[in-house]
Amino acid sequence: MSAVGDIHETRDGLRSDAELRQALAAGGVGVWMWDLASDRVFPDETTRRLLDLPDRTDIPAAQVLDALHPADAERIRAIAGDVRRGEDELKAVVRVRSSSSNVRWVQIHGRANVHFDGRRLSGVAVDVSDRMLAETALNATEARLRRAQELGGALPFEWDPQIEAFVASSAFRALHGFEPDERLDLATFLRCVHPDDRERVAEEHRRMLAMPGAFESEFRILRPDGSERWILQRGESIAEGALTSISGVHIDITSRKQVEAELRRSKRESRMRFRELRALYQHAPVGLALLDFDLRFVRVNEFLTNLTGLLLEEHVGRALFEVLPDLRERLAPAIQKVLETGEPVRNIESEGARPGDPERKLWWNLHAYYLSDDYGATPGLGLVVEDVTARKQAERTRDLLSRELSHRIKNLFAVVASLVSVSARGNPQVEDFARTIRGRIEALGRAHDYVRPVEWEMAGSFAEPRHLHGLLEGLLAAYRGGAAERLIVTGDDPTVGPAAATALALSIHEFATNAIKYGALSSPDGVVEIACRARGETFEIRWTERGGPPLSGPPASSGFGSRLAVRSITRDLGGTLDVDWRREGLVVSLMLPLEELRR
């Protein structure tokens, strides 16, 4: 049976079926006929080659379908069923099962006709592998491009003027909160735009339709959950005849906007802090300077220029000790320590000439510190300069008055001692008594030298060692009454600082006064032992009385002297005072920080 009939009639006359098939084969077109009644296919040589069919004139349809990809075979079988029920056309692109690894795509196109023995399909088969591979590659490329755009945050869309709606990817719809199958016309799109930006976006859309070209804009959208996102819209509108299409992308720039807002806020805060620091730097009531590592002035404030008496330009670029040479001896070692350790050095006091007025001497108090930023970079050294001349003058005046007062007090001791001697002169009965009284008065004078630590800085006649035992011996000499064994000092003998000596002298003097009035020293056989012992960072002074009148307990009230002793130990020296009123004699235990004892 012939696939297309025996003879075809054309304007040029009759041509043989063989000539027509030969022409089709030359163009790579195969001819076939499917007899639906017998369910057999009659392919020509080209069709058999395209579908990898055996070399026979007729082949069962099932065998032909087996040559196709299973999914495509099912589709062709379903279409053939439709033709049996009255459809007139079969059109499909199928994949052929090939013995090679290459995929062959064949386009099949046939029409139904009625023969005396049933319905038939007649048609052609064409190899479209190259086209399909190109389309597949193009689709894959487009898919990769869309994926790359989505991963990069660029979500494509297109305005189709034919349907007056947006065509957009699923990711685009998800970003804006649209349903996958929702029609996306301009009104629908504008509903998601922030109300404050909606009119502007609508106007931009109208302008893109009226004036084709590239465009870019930013606006906010509101998602269904109420969250706000910033969108960068970028693309191009193209005129196509009377219609204009728009293609572009939407990029979510919310994070960028947040960073920009944070950056603006940070800049505002930085400017505000800079203004505050600049005002503080310029108007601070102390001199401030920034030095580089060559110790040259980089920046100074106005107050420092007032202190030095030099202009701003007479500081910047000059070395520190070129401007303040008198401070080198004291300040240079301190700055070197700051450079080596990175730790600040404070309260460096030195006297020197004022650079702008060399005849005038000032007392300078300086603080040096290391400067570093948040990243560890170090621009140099900071210097704080104070004029403490007035304070030093006040201290000198106070010391002068203190020495004068101390001198007058010692003169009073001397006057009283002289009066006692004069009163006893010529009266043998009271000379021994007078000598005793005079000795105690002189001992009180020596104790007074310890109580006045300012005297230690003077080259005076009193040069007792500045140790604890020396302090105690000087204080208690007036209470021995000529019997050294009545007051015994034992144990460790640490150095004592001026501040600690004052507090200790007041306390020990109070204990001794009470002992001679009411305690062990009020009895001829009474003894006081003062044991001194270091306990690590703590020092103990234990005052123990024996041989005095029996004690019945602590007194009902304490006098001013006792309260002064407690305050001197606890507040001034940061120690503790424990009193044990034993019947056989008073025991007082002083626990002092060793560091405070040397202060």
Image (cartoon, rainbow, N blue to C red):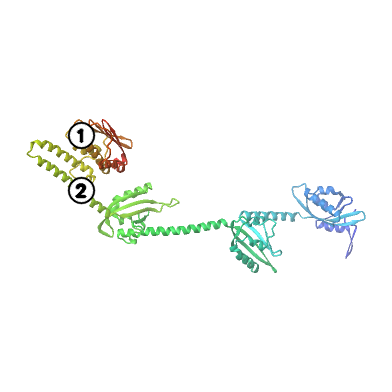
Vertically, is 217 above or below 533? below
Say whether residue 299 is left or right of residue 246: left
User: Residue 551: where, in percent of width, then height?
Assistant: 26, 32
Q: Report the side of 43 relative to 324 (left or right).
A: right
Tell me where residue 367 appears, x and y as whole percent.
34, 51
Amino acid carrying label 2: it is: Arg
- Determine whether, in the image, residue 295 is placed left or right of residue 73: left
Q: Residue furthest left?
A: 426
Q: Quadrant of residue 363?
A: bottom left
Q: Quadrant of residue 214?
A: bottom right
Q: Give the secondary structure at mark 1.
A: helix
Q: Nearer the viewer, residue 571 or 556?
A: 556
Between circles 1 and 2, the one closer to the viewer is 1
Q: Identify residue for label 1.
A: 522
Q: For label 1, count other residues whose C-alpha is less than 10 Å away and answer few (under 14), some (14-19) or many (20+).
A: some
State which quarter of the image contains the C terminus: top left
Residue at 19% across / 35% down in the picture? Answer: 480
> Three-letter amino acid code at disc 1?
Ser
Classify mark 2: helix, strand or loop: helix
Where is residue 8 drawn, in percent x and y?
Answer: 89, 60
Please state the total of marks drawn on the protein image: 2
* Viewer can see residue 294: no
Whether the residues at callouts 1 and 2 have beta carbons within 8 Å, the answer is no
User: Which residue is depicted at the point 43% across and 58% down?
Assistant: 274
Q: Residue at left 32%, top 62%?
A: 311
Q: Residue at x 47, y 59 (%)?
A: 268
Q: CA distance from mark 1 to mark 2?
A: 34 Å
Name the residue carrying label 2.
403
